[in-house]
């Protein structure tokens, strides 16, 4: 595991964009795993800027980590909508190469199997971008999620529901379930980059990096990945030991 500590959110986003840009230049037809939420917004702004400067996404395939279950793609709080507004409508990724779980599919089990099959058919994920929840979740794999899990319908923890309520008009509108890549699906990625900013993530980061590997803190499994980089701002890194900093 490699730890990079940026001065601030902007530098964190630029460092992550550098990694993705270098990857695409080296492998134009590569497979990217993408995340949502507030953390990667700066990264996506950087990628849009790089595209405007000539970075070509026309052969890239993407897979998103998750989607709320029960929301249609057109819902303004869906991750389909998020990805289109913040990234895809500004890039030249072909529509047929964009993959996001269908939260409106009433046959969740079939949707999960199909999503895993699509990842396999694409040759697996080359570079996966992650955020981290304050409870240590990655994707929507909440504490207690099995390390051997693949894409599945999951129940969201109360802390996650509360954290995400800011994206909805009313707290009761927040979905209680999501379709998420499993931890095994994430760990099968060839390279992983996790981004975290803000003091609210400091405890989860310290436990993920320096604590025991346990299903009680899903992100701790990343200690076992052969090519994983954490890019943190100063606040998210503040509880790491001096030797790590």
Image (cartoon, rainbow, N blue to C red):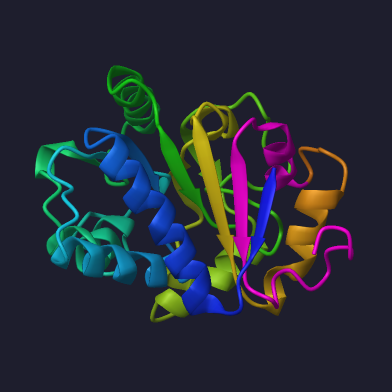
Is 207 placed left or right of 115 in the picture?
Answer: right
Question: Between 1 and 71, which is closer to the camera in this rendering?
Answer: 1
Question: Between 218 and 174, which is closer to the camera in this rendering?
Answer: 218
Q: Is residue 89 above or below residue 165?
A: above
Name the spot of residue 232 as percent of width and height, x first. Answer: 63, 66
Query: Measuring 40% from the left and 76% from the top, which residue is drawn there?
Result: 168
Q: In this view, does 213 lie above or below 195?
A: above
Name the spot of residue 80 as percent of width and height, x first. Answer: 26, 55
Name the spot of residue 47 as percent of width and height, x first. Answer: 29, 62
- Quadrant where the C terminus sits is bottom right
- Quadrant where the N terminus sits is top right
Residue 225 part of the magenta segment: yes
Q: Is residue 186 above or below residue 25?
A: above
**Occupied quadrant, residue 91:** bottom left
Name the spot of residue 189 as percent of width and height, x first. Answer: 49, 31
Is 76 placed left or right of 1 in the picture?
Answer: left
Query: Measuring 22% from the left and 37% from the top, which residue is drawn there?
Result: 28
Is 26 placed left or right of 172 in the picture?
Answer: left
Q: In this view, does 69 lie above or below 215?
A: below
Q: Magenta region: which residues?
A: 217-245
Q: Can residue 63 be seen at all in this image of the molecule?
A: no
Q: Can residue 136 be seen at all in this image of the molecule?
A: yes
Query: Measuring 16% from the left and 66% from the top, which residue is drawn there?
Result: 53
Q: How many labels does the image show?
A: 0
Is 24 placed left or right of 243 in the picture?
Answer: left
Residue 137 part of the magenta segment: no
Query: Measuring 59% from the left and 49% from the top, which residue is drawn there?
Result: 138
């Amino acid at each position: 595991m490699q730890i990079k500590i940026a001065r601030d959110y902007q530098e964190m986003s630029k460092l992550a964009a550098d990694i993705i840009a270098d990857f695409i230049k080296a492998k134009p037809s590569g497979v990217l795993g993408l995340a949502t939420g507030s953390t990667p917004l700066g990264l996506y702004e950087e990628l849009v800027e790089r595209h405007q400067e000539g970075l070509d996404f026309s052969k890239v395939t993407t897979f998103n980590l998750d989607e709320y279950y029960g929301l249609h793609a057109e819902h303004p709080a869906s991750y389909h909508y998020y990805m289109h507004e913040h990234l895809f409508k500004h890039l030249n990724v072909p529509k047929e190469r964009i993959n996001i779980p269908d939260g409106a599919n009433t046959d969740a089990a079939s949707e999960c199997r199909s999503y895993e099959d699509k990842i396999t058919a694409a040759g697996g994920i080359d570079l996966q971008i992650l955020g981290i929840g304050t409870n240590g979740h990655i994707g929507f794999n909440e504490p207690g999620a099995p390390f051997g899990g693949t894409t599945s319908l999951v129940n969201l923890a109360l802390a996650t529901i509360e954290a995400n309520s800011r994206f909805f008009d009313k707290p009761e509108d927040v979905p209680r379930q999501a379709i998420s890549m499993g931890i095994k699906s994430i760990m099968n990625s060839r390279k992983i980059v996790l981004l975290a900013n803000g003091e609210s993530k400091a405890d989860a980061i310290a436990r993920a990096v320096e604590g025991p590997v346990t299903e009680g803190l899903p992100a701790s499994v990343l200690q076992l990945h052969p090519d994983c980089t954490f890019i943190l701002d100063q606040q998210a890194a503040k509880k790491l030991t001096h030797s790590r900093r």
